[in-house]
Structure formats: C-alpha cells, structure tokens
Image (tube, grey):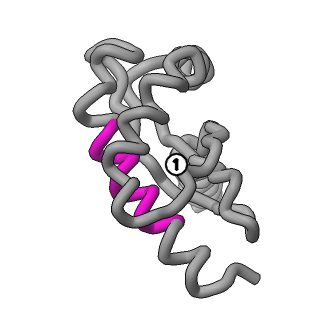
Amino acid sequence: MESKRQLQVAELIKRNFGIILQQEGTYVYGAEPLVTVTSVKISPDFNIAKVYLSVFNIEDKQNVILHIEDNYLRLRQVAAQRLRKHMRRIPAFEFFLDDTLDEMYRLKEIFKDLHENNQMGTGTSE
C-alpha cells in the first residue's frame, strides 16, 4: 500500500514528465509516435520512480522506450529542473511500456468477432 506522500510524488512526477515528453519528445524519439505517461509508481524510499508509458502511432513501441532510455540523462536533467522546488532528491527513473490500451483494443476485436459469429450462427438456423 502506497503512502499518501508516495501518491502525491507519483502524481507530481506523472504530470511533469508528461510535459517533458511533449517538449523534448521530438528530439528523443521523433515526431511520429505519441507517448503519454499512464502511471508512475514510486518506491517507499523515493529513490526509484517506475514510469509507465503508452505509445501510439508506431508499430515498434519497444524501440521508443529504448530511445527514451538512451536519452535518460537529458530527460532526468530536465525533470530535475522542473521538480527541484518540490522534492529534495530526484529519483532514478525506470521506463516500462504500458500496453493496457493495446490489450483492450485486441480484446474488443475478439469480442466483436465472437458476437458477429454468434449472430451468423443464430441467423442461419431460422
């Protein structure tokens, strides 16, 4: 269970890192992909922030995460400038691909196909 302070810091990092990706994203991974911060989990000692990213408009999503990790120092420096008035120590960032929306769309298509097959099956028996 996360403490109230952990939740506050996670939300602060989420909002600011989203802005950072809007401003610095074209330099890091190009203009094509759309990257959003879906959630942030912070460790109890506030030393590690796990940043979950959702990537759209591109097939190779993991490659975008690799570009972000390659530009880690630049992003951490910008984050430190934005967060220094709110936090004593800036945590280390770990980036993860959040494919929840992709999975949701995949399941939606499966259910749609099942529904259509079910409709066809009941329509032919009459």
Q: Is residue 43 left or right of residue 71?
A: right
Task: Give 107 or 3, whichever is nearer the viewer.
Answer: 3
Q: Is residue 103 visible?
A: no
Query: Residue at left 50%, top 18%?
Result: 71
Quadrant of the rendered image containing residue 86: bottom left
Seen at 44% across and 48% down, the residue is: 37
Q: Is residue 37 visible?
A: yes
Write the start and end of the magenta stretch as one range.
10-20
Which residue type carries mark 1? Leu
> 110 or 60, which lies in front?
60
Quadrant of the rendered structure where residue 57 is?
A: top left
**Total numbered badges shown on the rendered structure:** 1
- Provide residue 114's location: percent of width, then percent of height: 63, 51
Q: Is residue 79 left or right of residue 111?
A: left
Nearer the observer, 41 or 90: 90
In percent of width and height, residue 108 lies at: 54, 52
Secondary structure found at label 1: helix
**Vertical order, 9 against 113 (above or below):** below
Q: Main secondary structure of the magenta part?
A: helix
Point out the residue furthest to the bottom here. 4
Q: Is residue 71 above or below residue 18?
A: above
Quarter of the rendering occupied by the C terminus: bottom right
Of 107 and 19, which appears nearest the observer?
19
* Residue 78 in the figure: left or right of residue 104: left
- The residue carrying mark 1 is 101
Task: Name the residue at 66% across, 84% down.
Answer: 3
Q: Is residue 17 covered in magenta?
A: yes
The residue positioned 58% from the left and 86% from the top of the image is 4
Residue 105, percent from left and from top: 52, 46
